Image (cartoon, grey):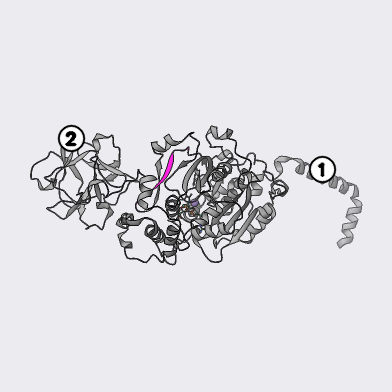
């Protein structure tokens, strides 16, 4: 027997013909596999590899010279903005992912980085002709612990849906993320795929989103700076209407209409339009319906319209103007307050804040934050301290209404605000009263222009009317609780000149024949009218019944009862009466 390699050669020699046949068969088989489209890894498979360097780079290279929009990812999940479902296997430990990211990262990872989404604009927007010579834009996206697929999808949506001659650059500001793939792999990916269209700046220390936005904007070179959160999808034609309005009015700060990207399944849904931004006196942002006066002033329903405040994340401003009016407050930490601060400031200092119906951008609203919310100075309550700064600089005496909600902050340190007050002086800005009267006349001021306000005490006990910690987000019961001597916003009620018994945004009405709750105020609703008689009773107009409380102990619900002269549980005294 031949041994070792000799045996091998002998074998080959003897079997040469058969061996050649096998080679040919293998070759044909390989050709078949390569040419059969079903056996190639799909676009989706390729995209799910991370870091994703196996993409068909030629197709998607989007640098200045070879700017093309990638082919749609046919057959991929989530196309046309559809929601994505997960297999049982993919859903394994999903709760942990949700608890960490506050959105469904697994679903996001299944979707193409440049998926298609439905054009959610009003059909009229599609035929608007914008001027050719619009200012250029730098899009600034700040991120802290955001993930690969939503961040890159934000970038692709901007690159694919902005006219290339208008987009100067995209600037990604990494606010010291702890996620490895967002470091060098992101640098490499952007360099390879986007050339100098996308720049990445690494914050030298944790800046917090407010300073990070300043940092990005200072490094921007476009005429206009546009801020986006790092989990957005810009929709068709989103940029032109923003730039066109800034060309018309340099001092207008503009917000696209924010569409929703479902945090559970990533479904893109248009939100229509019909909102302005408002605020609570606790200095949180809220959405309100567009007032009639605003609708009436619009020439067309797709025109930009004024809004008293903005949510904060998505906005466009002439870059130089943004800094002329003070940029963001560099002493604000991490998250919160800067959106109302900029809103009040731009209005009070001669500019305007407008919502643009034809510009639409989707955003994933997350129920929590994937990053540490603790500031150095604001410690556990960065929003509270940031809001103190804005109240102290911009709200004049109306800051009382903020401190009424946040009594524990009275006397706390809010840092030095002299530089910010200097802006107000330099620009000769209006008062906060001017803002309330002219920009937001719908805002209810709890202690102005009312018949009575403050705690509503039963003079025979130490009990006050109380909303038991519930606010306008849900239904608000009206009950009694030990008086807190002005220390609780739950006990602050107003009796208005049009006879409503209300708090910030909710008026007392009868739920059934006897119990009382607070719900949306409606001036036309007779069920909401009350009189405070000289003898101390609060009489409900339509029923002619009196506000009464049965047990006279903490948490007892108030009721409507037949009025009885001298019944102690029907006597109420407001803390203040208008002179
Ligand atoms: C809203 C705004 C947000 C900001 C915030 C108030 C929208 C859609 N979003 O909160 O832009 O105005 O209200 O301050 O209106 N980030 C950092 N560093 C940090 C923390 C966050 O870079 O220390 C990034 C974060 O990765 C994200 C952006 O800032 O890209 C906004 O943060 P968010 O999405 O958690 O804030 P959101 O949408 O709750
Ligand atoms: Mn966000």
The correct choice, above or below, for 219 with respect to 231 in the image is below
Q: Is residue 279 visible?
A: no
Question: Taking 17 as reference, is 373 left or right?
Answer: left
Point out the stretch of residues depicted in magenta.
Answer: 271-282
Looking at the rendering, which quadrant does residue 338 occupy? bottom left
Question: Taking 577 as reference, is 88 left or right?
Answer: right
Q: Residue 260 bears which disc, if any?
A: none
Residue 501 at x, y percent in the picture: 24, 43
* Mark 2 vs 1, N-terminal side: 1
Decide which of 352, 201 is in the foreground and name it.
Answer: 352
Under circle 2, the secondary element is loop
The correct choice, above or below, for 383 with respect to 530 in the image is below
Question: Are the residues tagged 2 and 1 within 8 Å (C-beta)?
Answer: no
Who's the residue at 56% across and 48% down the image? 108
Under circle 1, the secondary element is helix
Residue under label 2: 543
Residue 18 at x, y percent in the picture: 87, 47
Residue 244 at x, y percent in the picture: 57, 42
Classify mark 1 as within 8 Å of ligand 1 or not, answering yes or no.
no
Q: CA distance from mark 2 to mark 1?
A: 91 Å
The correct choice, above or below, for 352 with respect to 337 in the image is above
Task: Report the residue that reaches farthest toward the left.
Answer: 566
Image mark count: 2
Mark in front: 2 vs 1: 2
Residue under label 1: 28
Residue 351 painted magenta: no
Question: Taking 30 as reference, is 444 left or right?
Answer: left
């Amino acid at each position: 027997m031949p041994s070792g390699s000799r045996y091998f050669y002998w074998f080959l020699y003897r079997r040469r013909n058969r061996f050649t046949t096998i080679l040919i068969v293998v070759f044909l088989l390989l050709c078949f596999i390569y040419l059969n489209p079903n056996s190639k890894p799909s676009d989706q498979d390729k995209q799910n590899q991370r870091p994703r360097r196996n993409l068909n780079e030629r197709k998607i290279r989007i640098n200045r010279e070879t700017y093309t929009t990638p082919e749609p990812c046919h057959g991929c999940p989530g196309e046309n903005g559809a929601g994505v479902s997960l297999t049982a296997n993919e859903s394994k430990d999903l709760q942990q992912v949700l608890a960490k990211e506050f959105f469904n990262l697994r679903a996001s990872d299944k979707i193409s980085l440049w998926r298609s989404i439905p054009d959610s604009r009003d059909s009229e927007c599609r035929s608007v002709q914008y001027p050719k010579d619009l200012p250029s834009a730098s899009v600034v996206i700040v991120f802290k612990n955001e993930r690969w697929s939503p961040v890159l999808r934000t970038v692709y949506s901007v690159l694919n849906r902005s006219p290339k001659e208008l987009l100067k650059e995209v600037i990604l500001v990494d606010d010291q993320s702890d996620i490895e793939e967002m470091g060098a792999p992101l640098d490499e990916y952007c360099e390879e795929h986007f050339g100098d269209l996308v720049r990445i700046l690494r914050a030298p220390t944790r800046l917090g989103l407010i300073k990070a936005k300043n940092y990005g904007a200072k490094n921007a070179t476009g005429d206009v700076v546009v801020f986006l959160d790092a989990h957005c999808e810009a929709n068709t034609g989103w940029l032109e209407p923003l730039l066109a309005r800034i060309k018309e009015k340099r001092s207008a700060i503009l917000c696209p209409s924010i569409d929703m990207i479902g945090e559970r399944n990533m479904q893109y849904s248009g939100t229509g339009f019909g909102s302005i931004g408002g605020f609570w006196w606790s200095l949180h942002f809220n959405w309100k319906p567009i007032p009639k006066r605003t609708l009436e002033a619009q020439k067309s329903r797709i025109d930009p319209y004024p809004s008293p405040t903005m949510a904060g994340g998505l906005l466009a401003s002439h870059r130089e103007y943004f800094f002329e009016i003070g940029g963001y407050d560099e002493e604000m930490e991490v998250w919160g307050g800067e959106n109302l601060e900029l809103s009040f400031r731009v209005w009070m200092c001669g500019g305007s804040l407008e919502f643009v119906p034809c510009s639409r951008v989707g955003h994933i609203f997350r129920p929590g934050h994937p990053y540490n919310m603790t500031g150095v100075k604001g410690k556990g309550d960065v929003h509270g301290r940031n809001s103190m700064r804005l109240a102290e600089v911009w709200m004049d005496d109306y800051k009382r209404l903020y401190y009424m909600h946040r009594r524990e902050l009275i006397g706390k340190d809010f840092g030095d605000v002299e530089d910010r007050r200097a802006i107000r002086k330099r620009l000769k800005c209006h008062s906060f009263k001017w803002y309330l009267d002219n920009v937001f006349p719908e805002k209810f001021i709890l202690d102005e222009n009312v018949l009575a306000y403050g705690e509503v005490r039963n003079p025979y006990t130490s009990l006050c009317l109380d909303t038991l910690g519930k606010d306008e987000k849900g239904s608000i019961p009206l009950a009694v609780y030990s008086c807190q001597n002005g220390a609780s916003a739950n006990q602050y009620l107003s009796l208005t000149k049009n006879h409503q018994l209300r708090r910030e945004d909710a008026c007392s009405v009868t739920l059934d024949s006897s119990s009382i709750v607070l719900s949306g105020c409606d001036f036309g609703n007779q069920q909401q009218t009350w009189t405070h008689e000289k003898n101390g009773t609060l009489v409900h107009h339509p029923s002619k019944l009196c506000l009464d409380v049965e047990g006279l102990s903490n948490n007892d619900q108030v009721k409507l009862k037949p009025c009885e002269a001298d019944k102690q549980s029907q006597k109420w005294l407001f803390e203040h009466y208008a002179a």
